[in-house]
Amino acid sequence: MTSWEQLESDCRSCHKCGLCSGRTNVVFGVGRCNANIMFIGEGPGEQEDLQGEPFVGPAGKLLDDMLSIIDVNRTNCYIANIVKCRPPMNRDPFEEEQVACLPYLQQQIELVKPDIIVCLGRIAAKRLIYPDYHITRDHGTWICRNGTWMTAIYHPSALLRDLNKRPETFRDLLSIRQKLREVHAEL
Ligand code: URA
């Protein structure tokens, strides 16, 4: 298995897809390397690209509030994205960009070995849970794959745009808190 150091250094010098040409920073991931729970977003936005850390822009502020509801913070979970370089104009990452970047995330997941993976939004859910995942239909449901519990919730950016989605997301967060308690007495 690759070490964290090797993985991060490979990732930082990556030229496997076109997104490398527009990046300021590779946004590798942040948090506890043996966390019980991982959150996976879509790809860095402007602030993330500038600061080199996932979810530090407006959606990130909301994510921090969402984490606090389930007694989680940036130091006791692990946060990463499907693609590690910013797609231009915040467009969805293309299929080929996701495919090129995915091995880095898969290795991060192997190293962290989380009990729970929470996909943030449609792109991560389709890529990691199943391809015909419909976030409006399937959010908050659980599947267990190879011993890891997986779910998806609305992306924080969607919750900034549409306040009507927040009550459902609150219920999904409570379900994640419950699952955390089931799999681990404490973080
Ligand atoms: N949106 C994402 O999906 N990831 C980030 O890191 C920031 C915004």
Image: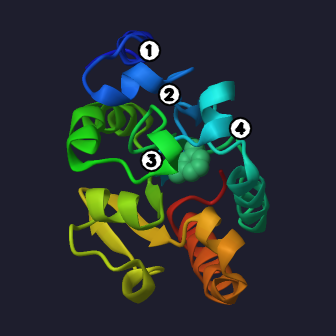
Give neighbour class at mark 4: few <14, some 14-19, many 20+ (Cα, 10 Å).
few
Q: Earlier in the sequence, mark 2 or mark 3?
A: 2
The span from disc 1 to disc 3 (Cα, nearest Å) is 23 Å
Q: Indicate the position of residue 121 as horizontal and vertical percent values.
A: 47, 65
The answer to whether marks 2 and 1 mark residues whose Cβ atoms lie closer than 8 Å is yes
Q: Which amino acid type corresponds to the residue marked 3 in the rendered image?
A: Pro
Q: Indicate the position of residue 179 as horizontal and vertical percent values.
A: 53, 71
Q: Is 125 placed left or right of 184 in the picture?
A: left
Q: Is residue 89 above or below residue 84?
A: below
- The residue at which mark 1 appears reads as 12
- The residue at which mark 3 appears reads as 114
Give the structural element (helix, strand or loop) at label 2: loop
The answer to whether marks 2 and 3 mark residues whose Cβ atoms lie closer than 8 Å is no
- The residue at which mark 4 appears reads as 75
Q: Is 163 placed left or right of 25 in the picture?
A: right
Give neighbour class at mark 1: few <14, some 14-19, many 20+ (Cα, 10 Å).
some
Q: Is residue 37 visible?
A: no
Picture disc at residue 28: 2
